[in-house]
Amino acid sequence: MTAGSVFTFRAYKFRINDFSLVAAVYEFVASGFCKVRQLLSTLVGNLTKQKFRVPKMNAIADCPTENELISKAKSGFQELFPGENPSIIASAPGRVNLIGEHTDYNDGFVLPMALPMTTVVIGNKAAVTDKCTVYTLSDAVGSNRQIIFTTPSIESELKPGEPKWGNYVKGVVANFPFKPLPAFNAVIISSVPLGGGLSSSASLEVAMYTFLESLTCVRATDLKQKALACQKAEHDYAGMPCGIMDQFISTMAEQGKALLIDCESMQGIYVPLSDPNVVVLITNSNIRHELTGSEYPTRKRQCMEAAAIMKKKSLRSASMEDLNTNKDAMSDVVFKRARHVIGEIERTQQAAKALQQSNYVEFGKLMVQSHNSLQNDYEVSCAELDELVAAALECEGVLGSRMTGGGFGGCTVTLLYAKYVQDVVNYITNKYSGNATFYIATASSGAHEIKI
Ligand code: ADP
Ligand code: MG
């Protein structure tokens, strides 16, 4: 029985005799154990509706450690492949982008940091078959959790297909430079929420690539090539024309540091981010608006159009002055899109400088400007993200807050003084119309192999 469930049980017993005690226990559990959230809400809510208002849960989610993930994956592997022992473990983190949104595919700057949330791939060489079997332990992909395929060769290419999640794996296998690959069995487990804007997809790709490095003993000498191969997997196999940021940070992150990435030159500069007085708080709106899927390519096309009008290779080489000079030659929408990107590229460089100088107040201001620009000019925010940002900014101790990731749902990122975290979480929880999940992010290291 987990600690969480022990407390659930106790709260249930106390409830029978003393409602105020239930309330106190409930508050206590709420702040520490998000897993029991629904059960408690139901228990306390049903039985005490008339007595007091049940506070909304304000739990900061526990992130399982890498070792906990490994041990679950090992058990999963042994169940799925009885009699076999995994000999390879690889792990690669998700990320949160602090600032620099929708700039990567415009050759601009981004400033992400890797998260403690990670994807682990565990497995071995297949002994008696030429087929690869890969299984994911993530419920979020639905019931079709296994893919079986033959490693690619000149005669038979690996093709994308169903289930969709398998294409991230197949894409990496297809783009791995060493061929022929030996067949393998693998199990995937992840603590990065899928589709939440924290880049579970890149963490899966990079973890898979790292697994293949260990399997073949052929390791990338140039980490940029590794990141590019993973990006290509997402482009060609998952059909997502993403920039390089996610794969780059998942590959190259260092503990205690954010990474300013110049997406044009593919150079990165590490920026220290380990001051215990400030915290990076991620708030998952738990909302994902289903769009037609055309939003991302449309934005990309609008950016290219603006660059072409200004006769620039990309928006990276355009200034605000160039934009204003060419205002009449473009539609209002294209103008606004370009204004966001050009402004955001500038803000990101300023933010990296501010972080280097531990100027968190300045950093926070730039985050807010970034959010406003994404909301009004790039139009990729949504009511829920705006609500979360507004709530955060009403709190004492908050330095800045903004949506992070592609938009239309997903997460916000907030920079705040450490001592205010719980108050801020409580406040946002009660203000937000939905149910948010909170994570405290510490800048973590990039992809690595783990010895068994
Ligand atoms: P994000 O990268 O922000 O989490 P994406 O839409 O880019 O969101 O990628 C999410 C998709 O990546 C999932 O729907 C799934 O197809 C795939 N994926 C990510 N992690 C896993 C995993 N652990 N197991 C299986 N598929 C995964
Ligand atoms: Mg992704």
Image: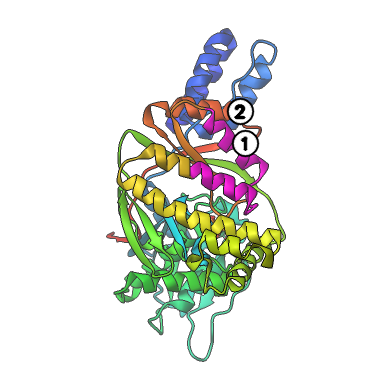
Q: Main secondary structure of the magenta part?
A: helix
Quarter of the image for residue 420 reads top left
For disc 1, the marked residue is 387
Residue 431, label in figure = 2
Residue drawn where x is 48% and y is 78% of the image: 174
Q: Is residue 269 above or below residue 382?
A: below
Q: Residue 436's x, y, as percent?
A: 57, 36
Residue 281, label in figure = none
Question: Quadrant location of the N terminus?
Answer: top left
Query: Could you tell me which secondary element the residue under label 2 belongs to?
Result: helix
Question: Furthest-front residue in view?
Answer: 325
Quarter of the image for residue 364 reads top left
In this view, the residue in front, 413 or 377, is 377
Which stretch appears magenta?
A: 367-394
Q: Is residue 171 above or below residue 299?
A: below
Type of amino acid at the residue the image marks with label 2: Lys
> Mark 1 or 2 closer to N-term?
1
Residue drawn where x is 54% and y is 38% of the image: 437
In this view, the residue in front, 381 or 433, is 381
Evaluate if marks 1 and 2 touch, with contact meaning CB atoms under 8 Å apart: yes
Q: Residue 416's x, y, as percent?
A: 42, 34
Q: Does the image show residue 90?
A: yes
Question: Quadrant location of the C terminus?
Answer: bottom left
In this view, the residue in front, 79 or 148, is 148
By what rule are the colours in the image chosen?
A: rainbow
Q: Which class describes the residues within 10 Å of circle 2: few (<14), some (14-19), or many (20+)?
A: some
Q: Is residue 141 above or below residue 364?
A: below
